[in-house]
Amino acid sequence: MTINIILPDNSVRQYPTGISGLEIARSISEGLARNVLAARVNGEVWDATRPIPSDSRLQLLTWDDEDGKAAFWHSSAHLMAEAVEQLYPGSRFGIGPDIENGFYYDIDLGEHVISDSDFAAIEAKMLEFAREKQAFTRKEVSKSEAIAYFREKGDEYKLELLAELEDGQITFYETGRFTDLCRGPHLPDTSFIKAVKITSVAGAYWRGDEKRKQLTRLYGITFPKQQMLTDYLTLLEEARKRDHRKLGKELELFTFSQRVGQGLPLWLPKGAQLREKLESFLKKVQRKAGYVQVISPHIGQKELYITSGHYEKYGKDSFRPISTPVEGEEFFLKPMNCPHHCELYRNKPYSYKDLPVRFAEFGTVYRYEQSGELHGLTRVRGFTQDDAHIFCRPDQVKDEFIGVIDIVLHIFRALEFKDFTAQISLRDPENKEKYIGSDENWEKAEQAILEAVQEKGLIATVVKGEAAFYGPKLDFMVKDAIGRKWQLGTIQVDYNLPERFELEYTGSDNEKHRPVMIHRAPFGSMERFVAVLIEHCAGNFPLWLTPDQVVILPISDKFQDYARAVRDSLEQADIRALLDERNEKIGRKIRDAELKKIPYMLVVGEQEAAGSTVSVRKHGTGDLGSMTTEAFTDMVAREVALAAV
RNA sequence: GCCGAUGUAGCUCAGCUGGCCAGAGCAGCUGAUUUGUAAUCAGCUGGUCGGCGGUUCGAAUCCGUCCAUCGGCUCCA
């Protein structure tokens, strides 16, 4: 009996029934066979060793295929589990998936505690088992057999997972001494795994539920070649150099003080300069888009947040209320700007002709984030949103939404953020009580977002259950230096606050109508945006943004006067210039300026003073030769203008 | 908040299993040098070793606790 196998190039080959992907690979070339990690059979990823029963389309997966890599790492999780079980008998296992960079396994170690000093032993055990070339053996089992096995083993986690599976779809995989409930697929055997690194250990709640037991999550990564691990670790090392916490310190952008408080950033002069540039850039964009600036105070009465619904939802997790000499009077630090903006809207009656009204404010808000959540500038307790609230008619929602998407994309383009993702967050249809507002309004809002995104041709993932409690949203996310995703820009439709604040406008029918509100922040928060920006450009900010654009380096004291004259003329032209007056050699001044990542260095000495020129050196590039001060000024002005900001 | 780790001068770090006055480089200060494209030389200053408590004849080192930071989990209006 033979079957037809269609390969990716559409060629058809005949093989005996029950041949495996691996055997087919071997029939093509021994080299291919050595690299085959898994097989895609009719679109489904299978073990390379699994017999193919009938005519099929086959793709052999190697390290270069995401699915091949996934099988590799998932198999590595099993290998790690086997090692852990040998080292710490009685361990029970939760789940052990592959992830973007490697894999993890959630393990209940009983009384045992694993710390990084144990990693080496686990790695050694894994390599030992890898060399044993243990096969991953797939076994179909009945549900009752499976339950019996894990009951015998006393693994309540696997039993819980089993309870959700149906009979007939349950498979076990055996690797050496370790048997796991697993769908697969897996590598043919463990010998493919040549390099192993346990990367970290952390607590993780079983099934992500804070109320359930915390298991030990062991993270690891493996490779088919030792060199690949070395390269990966080097890459990580490089990424850490871009970390905004490190660069923020080195470039004197911001700092934290224990005395001021956890999660409360202090912006140093250079950081403040940078942030101000970003703010004025956005203000200009917004002015053109019809926004008006407003200003509101940092606190608001308790009643304001009772009206908005925030008190009920977050009152307990906020900073403690501020009391006053008046009995019963309480104020809150504002955790959001929208309630204040609603009151601004209520200042006067609006006609349908007045809408949309767009109130913008760089509003500083305070939220009592859990201490374990705080992280550099990306997660803080006091931060400034580039906030605005658009009050519009229901028929304007989509256009306004589109307008905001345009602003976000404009900003990303200006700052060369190419690698972002967009996510539409809808409510969880199973848990409607988590949200405020009517079904009808939610449906209208979600529809508006979906349509706007579609019209802009934006590629966005849709996630149910991620909406804010008052409305659905569209978020823009960017990754940081070490691959963590952060939300930056956000656009949120809100039918609820206008209701709660009884906002109105008079329609053409002379009747009162309720406006729709759109919350939006293209940067998200200045803190987080600056953090991501720092990591994105590794501290080499675009010329128009960078705190110090130019530094003037006199060859010696003798040329201080000329150097000052150059600086003054640059400042006249609105160029931010420093003067290095230290009594140091030129090599030293250049080195320090390079380390400070200042875009342009102007060396001035005898020749320059004589000819009214400057000798220009560009950061990271080197000597550009000399030119007149005017020519340099023009060059900088042009470069700034070119950024189109 | 939870799990694990870390915490020595402004910065980066050394100080092993407890024992002379706690060290280095950079930064800073003083002086010399007057310099041509990534570190000039010399001298000096600077630390209640994260805070508090304990064990000990003796603690940066061991234990407890609190605080902060780091990696995750949960959360994120």
Image (cartoon, coloured by chain):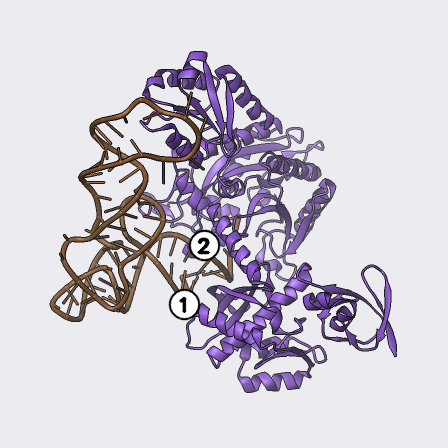
Specify the label residue A183 is tagged with.
none
Given residues A477 and B75, the one toward you in this image is A477
Q: The chain shown in purple is which?
A: A
Given the image, on which type of amino acid does mark 1 rest? Ser
Residues under labels 2 and 1: Cα distance? Answer: 25 Å
Disc 2 marks which residue? Answer: A373
Q: Position of residue A206 (x, y in %)?
A: 52, 69
Residue at (55% x, 52% y) in the render? A483
Residue A270, by quadrant, is top left
Given the image, on which type of amino acid does mark 2 rest? Glu
Q: Position of residue A194 (x, y in %)?
A: 57, 67
Residue at (58% x, 41% y) in the render? A519
Q: Residues within 10 Å of mark 1 (few under 14, many from 20)?
A: few
Specify the label residue A117 is tagged with.
1
Q: Residues within 10 Å of mark 2 (few under 14, many from 20)?
A: few
Residue at (46% x, 65% y) in the render? A201
Q: Chain of mark 1?
A: A
Please tell me which of labels 2 and 1 falls first in the chain: 1
Q: Position of residue A458 (x, y in %)?
A: 70, 44
| Left or right of A604, for residue A17 | right
- Mark 2 touches mark 1? (CB < 8 Å): no
Residue A223, by quadrant, is bottom right
Tell me the quadrant of the picture where the N terminus of chain A can be found.
bottom right
Q: From the viewer's perspective, is the residue at label 2 or at label 1 nearer?
A: 1
Given residues A104 and A69, the one toward you in this image is A69
Give the secondary structure at mark 2: helix
Q: The chain shown in brown is which?
A: B
